[in-house]
Image (spheres, rainbow, N blue to C red):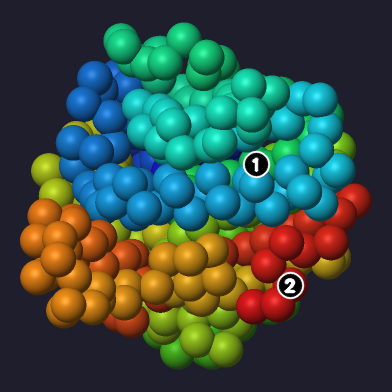
Amino acid sequence: MGEETTDGARGRAAAGGDAADGWRGWRAATEEALYGADGFYRGPEGPAGHFRTSVHASPLFARAVAALLGRVDEALGRPAVLDFVDMAAGRGELAAGVLAALPAEVAARTRVCAVEIAGRPDGLDHRIEWRAEPPREITGLLFANEWLDNVPVDVAEVDAAGVPRQVLVRRDGTERLGEPVSPQDARWLARWWPLAAEEGLRAEIGSPRDEAWASAVACVGRGLAVTVDYAHTVATRPPFGTLTGFREGRETAPVPDGSCDITAHVALDACALPGGRTLLQRDALRALGITGARPPLALAATDPAGYVRALAGAGEAAELTAPGGLGDFGWLLQPVGIVDPLDAV
């Protein structure tokens, strides 16, 4: 879900435009469907109206990100101005949650920026700056939760002769094969998503995401950049890709008409820059104090209300760290000029 241009607040300008017969690559079709004038992410309901991220699952996620920002602050030597940049901010839920969770002294010197293509939502804390692009020379933490999966990408499919070709799509979701992929895309596939010469195998060509992440990291002068997303590695790429749609909380066919989200899992290992590393969300959150441990039963006798609150918190933490669910999300950490604040994980 998330920036080099206004329309790049979640994605980058896609290559190619409308063909005379309506056939386009998935990257161009997705760009218009999600970020065009009437695109999916222009809607007033925001992402939370259609799917539930870790941010929406529990305020514990924002508290963990605030704790991570605190570690970055320490690594930076407590600068006079500490940046927190929320990429692909939705309606500002994470930015607001992090700001609320910070100690007063840290909050007083923190510049919070939400980066999003849609307009500023009503009622957002006035201390949160709303931007179409991230600020330059960030000193602090840039955090992108479910951004890269919505950076549009083209799709390749192997034809009967064993040749990877670009998949073309019409507005109604009908597909056909186009020309063989470009030499540049072929090189990316060979390095990061090798396709056997077997008809029907598919891959999402992730180079636009690599470029988008590199551009975001370049905005960090000193600090840490983190992106969190559905992910796979070169050893575990799915044979038929992951392109899909979401509408009103349900998975649906990816139709590029602006009626649904269009998303695909991220090759985080391809995105990683030198010095970056990936880990699972459950490991990152546990390192930041989100364990999911149940409160002691004795608390129920001495503080029943406190026990109920602690039990609810444990349930939320368990959801955020659950194997097979949110806990399997990948975190890509890119320190810039500091030591990795989660280097013990």
Residue 168 - label: none
Q: Residue at x 25, y 73 (%)?
A: 295
Farthest-out residue, right: 337
Nearer to us in this view, 37 or 130: 130
Residue 142 - label: 1
Q: x, y percentage for residue 174?
A: 23, 52
Nearer to us in this view, 140 or 273: 140
What amino acid is labelled 1 in the image? Leu
Q: Residue at x 31, y 11 (%)?
A: 123
Q: Would residue 145 be found to the left or right of residue 325 on screen? A: right
What amino acid is labelled 2 in the image? Asp
Q: Would residue 335 be found to the left or right of residue 192 on screen? A: right
Q: Residues within 10 Å of mark 1 (few under 14, many from 20)?
A: many
Q: x, y percentage for residue 65?
A: 52, 49
Relative to 171, residue 134 above or below: above
> Is disc 1 placed on a helix, strand or loop?
strand
